[in-house]
């Protein structure tokens, strides 16, 4: 769920088309992603990776955001396997 929220925010922060995303929609997606990262009972490694991914998106760097998203997916995968 967390990964999906962060990924959705990424789509609104960096749309693939030239159409712009309304700021209200982008803001709502950002808030939802941050809420999930803060409220879910997450392992510390997942929480840290999510914070890094969200921060990279907020900084507006596509390459940094993509790398942080790969890191988040990797951490989530490891945590899922451990369960």
Image (cartoon, rainbow, N blue to C red):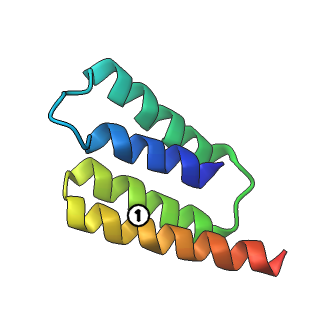
**Going by the image, does 49 lie left or right of 10?**
right
**Going by the image, does 6 lie left or right of 66?**
right
In which quadrant is the C terminus drawn? Answer: bottom right
**Going by the image, does 26 lie left or right of 75?**
left
Q: Residue at x 65, y 74 (%)?
A: 77
Quadrant of the image occupied by residue 12: top left
Q: Which residue is identified by label 1?
A: 52
Q: Position of residue 34 (x, y in %)?
A: 50, 43
Q: Residue at x 22, y 59 (%)?
A: 62
Q: Residue at x 14, y 34 (%)?
A: 18
For the view shown, which residue lies furthest in the left direction?
A: 18
Nearest the eye: 43 or 26 = 26
Vertically, is 51 above or below 16? below
Vertically, is 61 above or below 26? below
Vertically, is 26 above or below 75? above
For the view shown, which residue lies furthest in the front direction?
A: 17
């Amino acid at each position: 769920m967390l990964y999906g929220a962060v990924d959705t925010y990424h789509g609104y922060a960096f749309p693939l088309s030239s159409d712009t995303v309304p700021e209200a929609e982008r803001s709502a997606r950002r808030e939802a992603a941050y809420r999930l990262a803060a409220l879910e009972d997450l392992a510390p490694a997942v929480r840290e990776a999510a914070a890094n991914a969200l921060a990279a998106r907020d900084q507006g760097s596509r390459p940094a955001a993509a790398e942080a998203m790969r890191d988040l997916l990797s951490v989530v995968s490891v945590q899922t396997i451990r369960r």
